[in-house]
Image: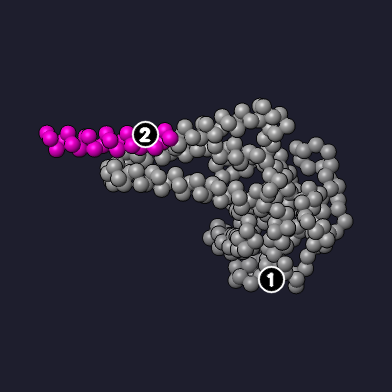
Amino acid sequence: MTVWLVAVSVVAVGALVAVLVLSILLGRSRRRYARLLASTRSRPESRPRLGAGPRAEGLLGATHRAVRIANTTAARLRRHGVGGLLLSSLDDLTRWAEEHRGELARVTAPDGTITFVFTDIIDSTTLNEELGDKAWVRLLQAHDHLVRTQVDTRGGHVVKSLGDGFMVAFSTPEPAISAAIAIQHALAQRKHKALRATPITVRIGIHRGPAITRDGDYFGRTVATAARVAAQAGSEEVLVSADTLDGLPDPGRFRLAEPRRTELKGLKGDHALHPVEWTSHQPV
Protein backbone atom coordinates (compact mmCIF):
# COMPACT_ATOMS: atom_id res chain seq x y z
CA MET A 1 0.00 0.00 0.00
CA THR A 2 2.81 2.40 0.88
CA VAL A 3 4.52 1.81 -2.47
CA TRP A 4 1.23 2.40 -4.27
CA LEU A 5 0.66 5.69 -2.42
CA VAL A 6 4.18 6.87 -3.25
CA ALA A 7 3.64 6.05 -6.94
CA VAL A 8 0.35 7.93 -7.01
CA SER A 9 1.97 10.90 -5.25
CA VAL A 10 4.79 11.00 -7.79
CA VAL A 11 2.34 10.95 -10.69
CA ALA A 12 0.25 13.67 -9.06
CA VAL A 13 3.27 15.89 -8.50
CA GLY A 14 4.36 15.33 -12.10
CA ALA A 15 0.94 16.31 -13.39
CA LEU A 16 0.95 19.46 -11.26
CA VAL A 17 4.38 20.41 -12.58
CA ALA A 18 3.19 19.91 -16.16
CA VAL A 19 0.08 21.99 -15.55
CA LEU A 20 2.19 24.72 -13.97
CA VAL A 21 4.54 24.86 -16.95
CA LEU A 22 1.64 25.00 -19.41
CA SER A 23 -0.18 27.60 -17.31
CA ILE A 24 2.87 29.86 -17.34
CA LEU A 25 3.13 29.50 -21.12
CA LEU A 26 -0.55 30.26 -21.69
CA GLY A 27 -0.48 33.17 -19.26
CA ARG A 28 2.48 34.77 -20.96
CA SER A 29 0.92 34.32 -24.40
CA ARG A 30 -2.37 35.86 -23.29
CA ARG A 31 -0.65 38.83 -21.65
CA ARG A 32 1.51 39.49 -24.72
CA TYR A 33 -1.52 39.25 -26.99
CA ALA A 34 -3.55 41.54 -24.72
CA ARG A 35 -0.74 44.14 -24.81
CA LEU A 36 -0.61 43.90 -28.59
CA LEU A 37 -4.37 44.47 -28.88
CA ALA A 38 -4.28 47.33 -26.38
CA SER A 39 -1.49 49.07 -28.27
CA THR A 40 -3.35 48.82 -31.58
CA ARG A 41 -6.55 50.19 -30.06
CA SER A 42 -4.77 53.16 -28.50
CA ARG A 43 -2.84 53.90 -31.70
CA PRO A 44 -5.14 53.38 -34.71
CA GLU A 45 -2.34 54.25 -37.11
CA SER A 46 -0.30 51.33 -35.83
CA ARG A 47 -2.95 48.64 -36.19
CA PRO A 48 -1.41 45.48 -37.55
CA ARG A 49 -1.30 45.28 -41.29
CA LEU A 50 -1.44 41.87 -42.93
CA GLY A 51 2.35 41.89 -42.74
CA ALA A 52 2.13 42.03 -38.95
CA GLY A 53 0.06 38.87 -39.02
CA PRO A 54 2.94 36.49 -38.23
CA ARG A 55 3.39 38.08 -34.80
CA ALA A 56 -0.28 38.04 -33.85
CA GLU A 57 -0.82 34.56 -35.24
CA GLY A 58 2.29 33.39 -33.42
CA LEU A 59 0.85 34.48 -30.09
CA LEU A 60 -2.42 32.73 -30.77
CA GLY A 61 -0.55 29.68 -32.01
CA ALA A 62 1.11 29.33 -28.61
CA THR A 63 -2.21 28.20 -27.17
CA HIS A 64 -2.63 25.49 -29.79
CA ARG A 65 0.94 24.34 -29.25
CA ALA A 66 0.40 24.15 -25.51
CA VAL A 67 -2.66 21.97 -26.00
CA ARG A 68 -0.68 19.59 -28.21
CA ILE A 69 2.04 19.36 -25.54
CA ALA A 70 -0.59 18.64 -22.89
CA ASN A 71 -1.85 15.69 -24.92
CA THR A 72 1.54 13.96 -24.51
CA THR A 73 1.90 14.61 -20.78
CA ALA A 74 0.41 11.32 -19.53
CA ALA A 75 2.50 9.20 -21.91
CA ARG A 76 5.72 10.92 -20.88
CA LEU A 77 4.88 10.47 -17.21
CA ARG A 78 4.63 6.73 -17.77
CA ARG A 79 7.86 6.53 -19.81
CA HIS A 80 10.19 9.01 -18.15
CA GLY A 81 8.80 10.00 -14.76
CA VAL A 82 8.52 13.54 -13.41
CA GLY A 83 12.04 14.66 -14.27
CA GLY A 84 11.80 13.37 -17.82
CA LEU A 85 8.40 14.99 -18.26
CA LEU A 86 9.57 18.40 -17.13
CA LEU A 87 12.70 18.35 -19.27
CA SER A 88 10.80 17.09 -22.34
CA SER A 89 8.14 19.79 -21.99
CA LEU A 90 10.69 22.55 -21.57
CA ASP A 91 12.70 21.21 -24.51
CA ASP A 92 9.55 21.20 -26.67
CA LEU A 93 8.66 24.77 -25.71
CA THR A 94 12.20 26.05 -26.25
CA ARG A 95 12.54 24.32 -29.61
CA TRP A 96 9.16 25.65 -30.78
CA ALA A 97 10.05 29.23 -29.78
CA GLU A 98 13.41 29.07 -31.55
CA GLU A 99 11.94 27.59 -34.73
CA HIS A 100 9.12 30.16 -34.78
CA ARG A 101 11.47 33.11 -34.33
CA GLY A 102 13.88 31.71 -36.91
CA GLU A 103 11.22 31.30 -39.56
CA LEU A 104 9.86 34.82 -39.11
CA ALA A 105 13.33 36.35 -39.21
CA ARG A 106 14.21 34.42 -42.34
CA VAL A 107 11.20 35.19 -44.54
CA THR A 108 9.94 38.57 -43.36
CA ALA A 109 11.56 41.78 -44.59
CA PRO A 110 12.09 44.76 -42.24
CA ASP A 111 9.04 46.46 -43.79
CA GLY A 112 6.84 43.45 -42.99
CA THR A 113 6.57 42.14 -46.55
CA ILE A 114 7.30 38.67 -47.88
CA THR A 115 8.18 37.73 -51.45
CA PHE A 116 6.30 34.61 -52.59
CA VAL A 117 7.36 32.34 -55.43
CA PHE A 118 5.00 29.80 -57.00
CA THR A 119 6.34 27.14 -59.35
CA ASP A 120 4.28 24.81 -61.53
CA ILE A 121 5.18 21.99 -63.93
CA ILE A 122 3.52 22.51 -67.31
CA ASP A 123 1.11 19.71 -68.36
CA SER A 124 1.88 17.65 -65.27
CA THR A 125 -1.33 15.62 -65.50
CA THR A 126 -0.58 14.61 -69.09
CA LEU A 127 2.98 13.65 -68.14
CA ASN A 128 1.73 11.54 -65.24
CA GLU A 129 -0.67 9.74 -67.54
CA GLU A 130 2.02 9.05 -70.12
CA LEU A 131 4.72 7.92 -67.69
CA GLY A 132 2.72 6.02 -65.13
CA ASP A 133 2.90 6.63 -61.40
CA LYS A 134 6.30 5.08 -60.67
CA ALA A 135 8.18 6.95 -63.40
CA TRP A 136 6.27 10.13 -62.55
CA VAL A 137 7.33 9.90 -58.91
CA ARG A 138 10.99 9.51 -59.96
CA LEU A 139 10.66 12.58 -62.17
CA LEU A 140 9.05 14.55 -59.36
CA GLN A 141 11.87 13.58 -57.00
CA ALA A 142 14.46 14.95 -59.44
CA HIS A 143 12.42 18.13 -59.91
CA ASP A 144 11.87 18.59 -56.18
CA HIS A 145 15.55 18.15 -55.34
CA LEU A 146 16.51 20.69 -58.00
CA VAL A 147 14.02 23.30 -56.79
CA ARG A 148 14.81 22.85 -53.09
CA THR A 149 18.54 23.11 -53.75
CA GLN A 150 18.20 26.47 -55.52
CA VAL A 151 15.81 27.78 -52.85
CA ASP A 152 17.98 26.68 -49.92
CA THR A 153 21.13 28.10 -51.54
CA ARG A 154 19.51 31.55 -51.59
CA GLY A 155 18.00 31.50 -48.13
CA GLY A 156 14.40 30.83 -49.14
CA HIS A 157 11.84 28.82 -47.22
CA VAL A 158 9.73 26.12 -48.89
CA VAL A 159 6.30 26.71 -47.38
CA LYS A 160 4.76 23.63 -48.96
CA SER A 161 4.78 21.30 -51.92
CA LEU A 162 1.84 21.62 -54.27
CA GLY A 163 2.32 18.22 -55.85
CA ASP A 164 3.63 19.46 -59.19
CA GLY A 165 5.13 22.67 -57.85
CA PHE A 166 6.06 24.65 -54.77
CA MET A 167 5.05 27.66 -52.72
CA VAL A 168 8.22 29.38 -51.50
CA ALA A 169 8.83 32.45 -49.33
CA PHE A 170 11.77 34.86 -49.42
CA SER A 171 12.39 37.94 -47.32
CA THR A 172 13.27 40.11 -50.34
CA PRO A 173 12.71 39.98 -54.12
CA GLU A 174 16.33 39.72 -55.29
CA PRO A 175 17.08 36.19 -54.02
CA ALA A 176 13.59 35.13 -55.05
CA ILE A 177 14.15 36.17 -58.66
CA SER A 178 17.67 34.75 -58.63
CA ALA A 179 16.35 31.41 -57.40
CA ALA A 180 13.64 31.38 -60.08
CA ILE A 181 16.20 32.00 -62.85
CA ALA A 182 18.51 29.36 -61.38
CA ILE A 183 15.66 26.83 -61.37
CA GLN A 184 14.90 27.50 -65.03
CA HIS A 185 18.58 27.33 -65.91
CA ALA A 186 19.09 24.01 -64.07
CA LEU A 187 16.02 22.49 -65.74
CA ALA A 188 17.32 23.58 -69.14
CA GLN A 189 20.70 21.91 -68.44
CA ARG A 190 18.98 18.55 -67.76
CA LYS A 191 21.86 17.15 -65.75
CA HIS A 192 19.71 14.65 -63.86
CA LYS A 193 19.07 11.35 -65.62
CA ALA A 194 15.31 11.49 -65.08
CA LEU A 195 15.12 15.03 -66.47
CA ARG A 196 17.16 14.05 -69.53
CA ALA A 197 14.87 11.12 -70.21
CA THR A 198 11.73 13.22 -69.75
CA PRO A 199 12.36 16.97 -70.07
CA ILE A 200 9.91 19.12 -68.15
CA THR A 201 9.15 22.82 -68.26
CA VAL A 202 8.11 24.99 -65.35
CA ARG A 203 6.39 28.33 -65.04
CA ILE A 204 7.16 30.63 -62.13
CA GLY A 205 5.32 33.63 -60.70
CA ILE A 206 6.60 36.06 -58.05
CA HIS A 207 4.79 38.68 -56.00
CA ARG A 208 5.71 40.70 -52.92
CA GLY A 209 3.51 42.06 -50.14
CA PRO A 210 2.18 41.54 -46.60
CA ALA A 211 0.70 38.18 -45.61
CA ILE A 212 -0.95 36.36 -42.74
CA THR A 213 0.72 33.26 -41.30
CA ARG A 214 -0.85 30.40 -39.38
CA ASP A 215 0.62 27.03 -38.42
CA GLY A 216 3.53 27.43 -40.82
CA ASP A 217 1.35 28.37 -43.82
CA TYR A 218 0.58 31.76 -45.36
CA PHE A 219 -2.68 33.34 -46.46
CA GLY A 220 -4.08 36.60 -47.77
CA ARG A 221 -4.27 38.69 -50.91
CA THR A 222 -0.51 38.62 -51.48
CA VAL A 223 -0.45 34.83 -51.60
CA ALA A 224 -3.45 34.72 -53.93
CA THR A 225 -1.85 37.30 -56.21
CA ALA A 226 1.43 35.36 -56.38
CA ALA A 227 -0.47 32.21 -57.40
CA ARG A 228 -2.37 34.14 -60.07
CA VAL A 229 0.87 35.61 -61.43
CA ALA A 230 2.29 32.10 -61.78
CA ALA A 231 -0.86 31.00 -63.61
CA GLN A 232 -0.24 33.76 -66.19
CA ALA A 233 3.35 32.65 -66.84
CA GLY A 234 4.21 30.61 -69.89
CA SER A 235 6.49 27.62 -70.28
CA GLU A 236 10.01 28.32 -68.95
CA GLU A 237 8.93 31.83 -67.96
CA VAL A 238 9.64 33.80 -64.81
CA LEU A 239 6.93 36.42 -64.35
CA VAL A 240 7.11 39.10 -61.65
CA SER A 241 4.65 41.72 -60.46
CA ALA A 242 5.29 45.45 -60.28
CA ASP A 243 5.22 45.23 -56.47
CA THR A 244 8.06 42.72 -56.66
CA LEU A 245 10.19 45.10 -58.72
CA ASP A 246 9.44 47.94 -56.28
CA GLY A 247 11.30 45.95 -53.62
CA LEU A 248 14.53 45.69 -55.61
CA PRO A 249 17.32 48.02 -54.43
CA ASP A 250 18.76 47.91 -57.96
CA PRO A 251 15.99 47.78 -60.59
CA GLY A 252 18.62 47.10 -63.27
CA ARG A 253 19.82 43.93 -61.54
CA PHE A 254 17.72 41.77 -63.90
CA ARG A 255 16.85 42.06 -67.58
CA LEU A 256 13.13 42.47 -68.13
CA ALA A 257 11.01 42.17 -71.25
CA GLU A 258 8.18 44.56 -71.99
CA PRO A 259 5.48 44.20 -69.33
CA ARG A 260 2.04 42.99 -70.20
CA ARG A 261 -1.11 44.10 -68.44
CA THR A 262 -3.71 41.51 -67.59
CA GLU A 263 -6.55 40.77 -65.21
CA LEU A 264 -5.93 38.26 -62.45
CA LYS A 265 -8.78 35.95 -61.53
CA GLY A 266 -10.62 37.11 -58.41
CA LEU A 267 -8.60 40.34 -58.09
CA LYS A 268 -9.74 43.82 -59.05
CA GLY A 269 -8.22 45.86 -61.86
CA ASP A 270 -5.50 44.93 -64.29
CA HIS A 271 -1.91 44.22 -63.30
CA ALA A 272 1.46 44.87 -64.93
CA LEU A 273 3.44 41.63 -65.11
CA HIS A 274 7.10 41.66 -66.14
CA PRO A 275 8.80 38.66 -67.81
CA VAL A 276 12.38 38.16 -66.59
CA GLU A 277 14.81 37.42 -69.39
CA TRP A 278 17.33 34.63 -68.84
CA THR A 279 19.40 32.23 -70.92
CA SER A 280 20.32 28.59 -70.39
CA HIS A 281 24.03 29.51 -70.64
CA GLN A 282 24.06 32.21 -67.97
CA PRO A 283 23.16 30.96 -64.50
CA VAL A 284 22.54 33.48 -61.73
Which one is closest to the eye, mark 1 or mark 2?
2
Say if 253 sits above or below 230 in the image: below
Q: Which residue appears at 63% of the width and 51% of the height?
A: 107
- Quarter of the rendering containing residue 24: top left
**At which x and y percent is residue 136?**
58, 60
Under mark 2, the amino acid is Val
In the rendered image, which quarter contains the N terminus?
top left
Residue 267 showing in the rendered view: yes
Q: Which residue appears at 56% of the width and 39% of the height?
A: 58
* Secondary structure found at label 2: helix
Start and end of the magenta stretch? 1-24
Report the residue marked by disc 2: 19
Q: As drawn, is 68 to the left or to the right of 255?
A: left
**At which x and y percent is residue 78?**
27, 42
Report the residue marked by disc 1: 189
Q: Residues within 10 Å of mark 1 (few under 14, many from 20)?
A: some
